[in-house]
Image: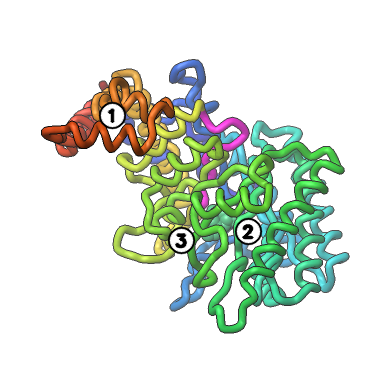
Amino acid sequence: MSYFNNINKIKYEGPTSTNPFSFKFYNPEEKIGDKTIEEYLRFGVAYWHTFAENLSDPFGAGTAIRPWDKFTGMDLAKARVEAAFEFFEKLNIPFFCFHDADIAPEGDNLKETYKNLDVIVSMIKDYMEDSKTKLLWNTANNFTNPRFVHGAASSNNADVFAYSAAKVKKGLEIGKELGAENYVFWGGREGYETLLNTNLALELDNLGRFFHMAVDYAKEIGFDAQFLIEPKPKEPTSHQYDFDVASGYAFLQHYGLQDHFKFNIEANHATLAGHSFEHELRYARIHGMLGSVDANQGHPLLGWDTDEFPTDIYATTLAMYEIIKNGGLGKGGLNFDAKVRRASFEAEDLFHAHIAGMDSFAVGLKIAQKLIDDNVMDSVIDERYKSYKEGIGKDIVEGNTNFHKLEEYALGLTEIKNESGKLERIKATINQYLLRAYAGE
Ligand code: XUL
Ligand code: CO
């Protein structure tokens, strides 16, 4: 059975194509440096937004019209697997990602839930044998069911801690079974609403304990996926524990977990934290902690997690700049944790959205590589910090000075001369690179 029978395989047709069902910039085989574009970008489809999302919002019911709508229960779960692999093939996508709850319905108890998962996981495994699409990561949904009302590993209720551990244990086994390259921990409801009823120290310690048990169990079963923490500052709780990369890194270091985790950085989570996407990527990169990316964008006028498909080429360029400088994403990839808008309710919109996202990152990759080849930002930065290459600056960075010597030096200064940061000049240069890319240069 075909779920998208009026849509053919999406091919690269180049920047001047007028066929909406074609890639304009994403040419998977094209080489950028020593990698193909496909190898660099490692795109993933998010199962939840693409196959399990009905597009409801707090003010209205779901609007999505999907070819699998007529099914329910396990039949629905099976239909989604069939539709997913048809979608992956037509889009030529190398990876996908899922939560346990996206692929199979919960049963009446945990044993039943495991049984449902086993059926669907074995079906996915069969489909993967005939497909190029691999599992970028899986994760546990420990936030939707009302049992997680007070959190999962940070719940006040130890039974919920145990239940969450069992779900992650099963998730690690599933990840191993399907050859997942990563395993993701997004905080979900790990956070709090008010300190008035919260034991902050115990909740943080318990989270640390939980992560250590996950690391131990993965080792025990020989699952060598990269573990990823996905920071988000708020939503659903008002204070999420994995606020941003900087606080997440401090948490990992405090609990001795820094060697076992990297970060999965989501663009819209970065902006919710009051950062730019590239800030979070840079912060992770310079600490050797950039693992993977949830590729999406927020709405500039809205203050919540809108999870839009990425179409802002300025943002994708600066993101790819960080990713190239990181030497790529290793086991990670660019997972479209993005949903079509509520008014884009037809199944074909799922293709338009992914094509737009893939093209936006492909063009961002090409521009970023040019900016790097031409040394555009590095030359500005080298020049701006030249005072640390000789004299007193060299002494400072090489550890050859102290407050006595610095005071002596400062007392001898007759004039301090700063130079312009030339921000507008740099921005104009970057515009030139963006516009040259539009012109196909
Ligand atoms: C929620 C979010 C999640 C994680 C996986 O904001 O980003 O979908 O990516 O649990
Ligand atoms: Co995400």
Report the amino acid beneath label 1.
Tyr
Residue 318: in magenta span: no
Residue 74: which quarter of the image?
bottom right
- Measured in 3D between alpha carbons, the distance from the residue under mark 2 to the one under mark 3, in whole angstroms, is 14 Å
Q: Which residue is mark 2?
A: 68
Q: Quick check: can you spot residue 135?
A: no
Rendered image: mark on residue 345 = 3
Q: Majority secondary structure of the magenta segment?
A: loop
Q: Nearer the viewer, residue 92 or 332?
A: 332
In the rendered image, residue 401, in percent from the top left (x then y), is placed at 38, 30
Q: Is mark 2 within 8 Å of ligand 1?
A: no
- Crowding near pointer 3: few (<14 within 10 Å), some, many (20+)? some
Q: Which residues are magenta?
A: 328-337
Q: Which residue reaches farthest top? A: 34
Who comes first in sequence, dot 1 or dot 3?
Answer: 3
In the rendered image, residue 102, in percent from the top left (x then y), is placed at 67, 58
Report the amino acid beneath label 3.
Phe
Side (left or right) of 331 relative to 296: right
Residue at (51% x, 63% y) in the render: 64
Residue at (52% x, 51% y) in the render: 337
Q: Quick check: can you spot residue 74?
A: yes
SS type, badge 2:
loop
